[in-house]
Amino acid sequence: MDYEKIFSQNKEKKIKGRYITLDDIEPLLKKLNRENQLQIIGKSVLENPIYSYQIGTGKIKILLWSQMHGNESTTTKALIDFLNFLNSESEVANQLLGFFTFYSIPMLNPDGAKLYTRENANKVDLNRDSQNLTQPESKILRKVYEDFKPDYCYNLHDQRTIFGVADTGKPATVSFLSPSYNEERSINEERVKGINVIVKMNEVLQRYIPGQVGRFDDGFNINCIGDTFQSMGTPTILFEAGHFQGDYDREETRKFIFFALLSGFIAIYENVVVGNQIVDYMNIPQNNPNFFDFVYKNVRINYDSSELITNFAAQYKEELINNKIFFNAFVVKIGDLEENFGHLEYDANKELYSDSNQNIPNLNQKADFYLGKNVQIVNGLVKL
């Protein structure tokens, strides 16, 4: 199957980048509302509508939700692309629509999306509210779950650029998890169903991003929505959209999330996810928070009247200014970086560090400095 071609045919070109709000997706959903598939299922804290989009007539019911965390928009883009595909009237799309019923919530947290925050407008992390259900958004998702009674749940998220695939030096561009349902992290029949789908998705992704698929930590937390739904007997799959080299807008990662969605549903449709593929699942390397956006090595500094050679790292902070996301780099670690990697690494070759302040790197300062007389670093990057 030509996943690249299918994606290019169905990619929604009206949304891109990291800042995706309800204003961006609402007209796209309305355009897809050909047979009354779009519904308002509730309101957010700030009274913004929360939409569902249901399509398909099959007996296998799939519940998908995205942007539970407002600043995690990659899977929302991929989900809209996938809805475009389901409406494409292609042979594969029609086969899936006859086999599945898809119930999606493309943006569970529209307030957080507008503010570009992880939390909702009450500053509550909805992914820690699955038991107490204190927030309207949490209650809406729970009611949908109870009424729809899905056969599979797809919990769609982004993860930070800090995650790599074990100690390979490769970024975790896509990560998966079949969550635990108890403290012992036991594996039962429902969890195996999610595991088997993940293995099939990983097999496809390895053709495009070899070595860049990770397995998310399965520590049990009943307050997390995936762990809750798994404990309630529904196979649940966590998606984490991560970093692809140079892709801070996550347009490449968006494509791979689409590949994963499509390939996983095809695997279920073709009935090739039966059996037990726990070993293959466990062989997917686990995520490791060992990356920085920038690593500078062998930097000479004047410290306390002595010259030292050190390393330091900088990380982007994402800041919303005038409805646009700016990536501003700050120093976050100084010293031993032996077990860390940088998405961009620079060897200073013992050139002397200097800046406009104390001429030594300090934590939390902006990553603007010189290395020697000729190399200027502005916002983490070498100024050309």
Image: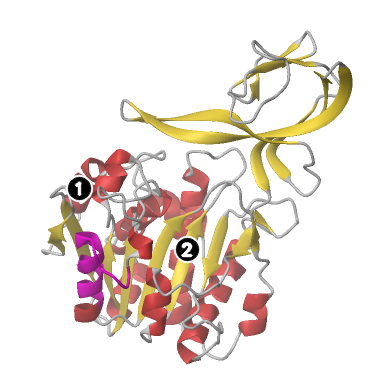
Q: Tell me if 240 is positioned left or right of 228 in this view.
A: right
Residue type for callout 1? Glu
Q: Is residue 138 magenta?
A: yes
Residue range (magenta): 130-145
Residue 87 spot, x, y in % from top left: 27, 61
The residue that label 2 is drawn on is 239
Q: Is residue 68 above or below residue 215?
A: above
Q: Is residue 253 above or below residue 130?
A: above
Label 1 crowd (10 A; few <14 / some 14-19 / many >=20) = some
Q: What residue sits 32% from the left and 75% below the top?
A: 62
Residue type for callout 2? Phe
Q: Nearer the viewer, mark 2 or mark 1?
A: 2
Q: Quadrant of residue 166?
A: bottom right
Looking at the picture, tell me which residue is in the foreground, 343 or 295: 295
Looking at the picture, tell me which residue is in the foreground, 372 or 132: 132
Q: What residue sits 36% from the left and 84% below the top?
A: 232
The residue that label 1 is drawn on is 26
User: Which residue appears farthest toward the top when viewing the image?
Assistant: 373
Q: Tell me if 213 is positioned left or right of 18 in this view.
A: right
Q: What residue sits 31% from the left and 25% below the top?
A: 322
Instruction: Work out whether residue 299 can be spotted.
Output: yes
Instruction: Work out whether residue 297 can be spotted.
Output: no
Q: Are marks 2 and 1 in contact (CB under 8 Å)?
A: no
* Label located before the other in sequence (2 or 1): 1
Chief secondary structure of the magenta portion: helix
